[in-house]
Image (cartoon, helix red, strand yellow):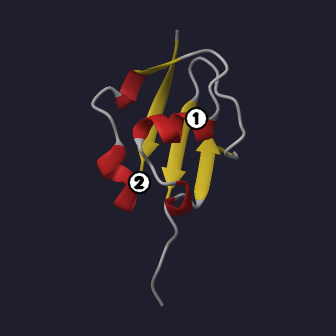
Amino acid sequence: MVHVTLKLFATLSRFTPDSGDRYPIAPGTTVKHLLEKLGVPEDDVRLIFINGIKGHLASTLTDGDRLGIFPPVGGG
């Protein structure tokens, strides 16, 4: 088991688990698989950052990664 720090922002914050500061995942878990496990709709995800660098749904997470997920931003 490896651990990541998980931050979901704005309207996605409701999906953040209590253990988001040290969330356990299986080795080889992708961002997409993690979001599915948390119940986050893929269409609600706009930006993915892993350790401050833009990531993708297919990005594989490793031990100690910091994952930030942002929804689309509206407004005008």
Q: Marks 1 and 2, Cα distance to the nearest angstrom?
A: 18 Å
Q: Quadrant of residue 53?
A: top right
Q: Decide which of 26, 2 is in the foreground and name it.
A: 26
Residue at (30% x, 50% y) in the render: 14
Residue 13 left/right relative to 62: left
In percent of width and height, residue 24 lies at 45, 18
The answer to whether any part of residue 51 appears in the image is: no
Q: Secondary structure at mark 1?
A: helix
Residue at (58% x, 27% y) in the render: 65
Answer few, some or many: residues within 10 Å of disc 1's Cα (few below 14, many 20 plus, some between 14 and 19).
some
Residue 70 left/right relative to 18: right
Mark closer to the observer (1, 2): 1
Answer few, some or many: residues within 10 Å of disc 2's Cα (few below 14, many 20 plus, some between 14 and 19).
some
Amino acid at pointer 1: His
Residue 74 vs 42, above or below: the answer is below
Extreme bottom residue here?
A: 76
In the picture of the structure, the residue carrying the numbered disc 1 is: 33
Residue 27 left/right relative to 37: right
Q: Does label 1 or label 2 sit earlier along the sequence?
A: 2
Amino acid at pointer 2: Phe
The answer to whether any part of residue 38 appears in the image is: yes
Residue 4 left/right relative to 56: left
Residue 20 vs 36, above or below: the answer is above
Residue at (50% x, 40% y) in the render: 36
In percent of width and height, residue 12 lies at 39, 55
- Marking on residue 9: 2
